[in-house]
Image (tube, rainbow, N blue to C red):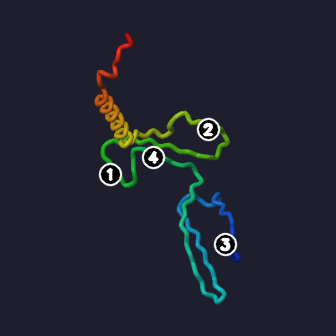
Amino acid sequence: MICEFDPPVKFVLDTTRIPDGKHFIRIVAKSSKGVEGAKEIPFEVRNGPEIVVVDLSDHEVVDTQVPITINAYGGETDDQFIIKGSETPKAIPAWVWALLISFIGFAMFYFVMYLTPDLYKSFF
């Protein structure tokens, strides 16, 4: 037991003293008749830098040579961060390409359907 309080209670959980990884907090309450109730709440601490791996997923089956990009992001500095581009390069999703092709196709269809000689009257 780390601490004991009378309900209701509010407190701040300081995760800077907890190592990164999966943890849980266990809360035990006792009624006035001595009956206990317990609840466990799992949580994950990540105070260290965020690590991003591109081109390799969890439990992926690979063969031959696989190029992998690894990037880490930390927030301990007080430096100013100016976004100049994507730090973790990713391909454009397929749904974006499908949406773009659909839009261009509809625009061409609309242009061809309403293209008539009446629209081109000469100013001379």
| Element assignment for label 2 | loop
Please state, as top left, top right, bottom left or bottom right, where the C terminus lies in the image.
top left
User: Above or below — where is 108 with respect to 61?
Assistant: above
Is 73 in front, or is 7? 7
Q: Which residue is mark 4?
A: 53
Residue at image point 70% right, 75% down: 5
* C-beta proximity under 8 Å, tags 2 and 1: no
Q: Pointers 3 and 1 in contact (CB under 8 A)?
A: no
Bin the neighbour count of mark 2 within 10 Å (Cα to Cα): few under 14, some 14-19, many 20 and up: few
In primary-sequence order, the first of circles 1 and 4 is 4
Image coordinates of residue 1 in percent, x first then y, are: 65, 75
Q: Secondary structure at mark 3?
A: loop
| Residue labelled with disc 2 | 81
Mark 3 / mark 4, whichever is N-terminal: 3
Rendered residue at 66%/61% (across/down): 14
Judge from the rendering whether residue 41 lies leftward or rightward of residue 55; answer left or right.
right
**Relative vertical location of residue 78 with respect to residue 18 in this rendering, above or below:** above
In the image, residue 102 lies at what x, y percent?
33, 38
* Label 1 SS: loop
Q: CA distance from mark 3 to mark 4?
A: 37 Å
Residue under label 3: 2
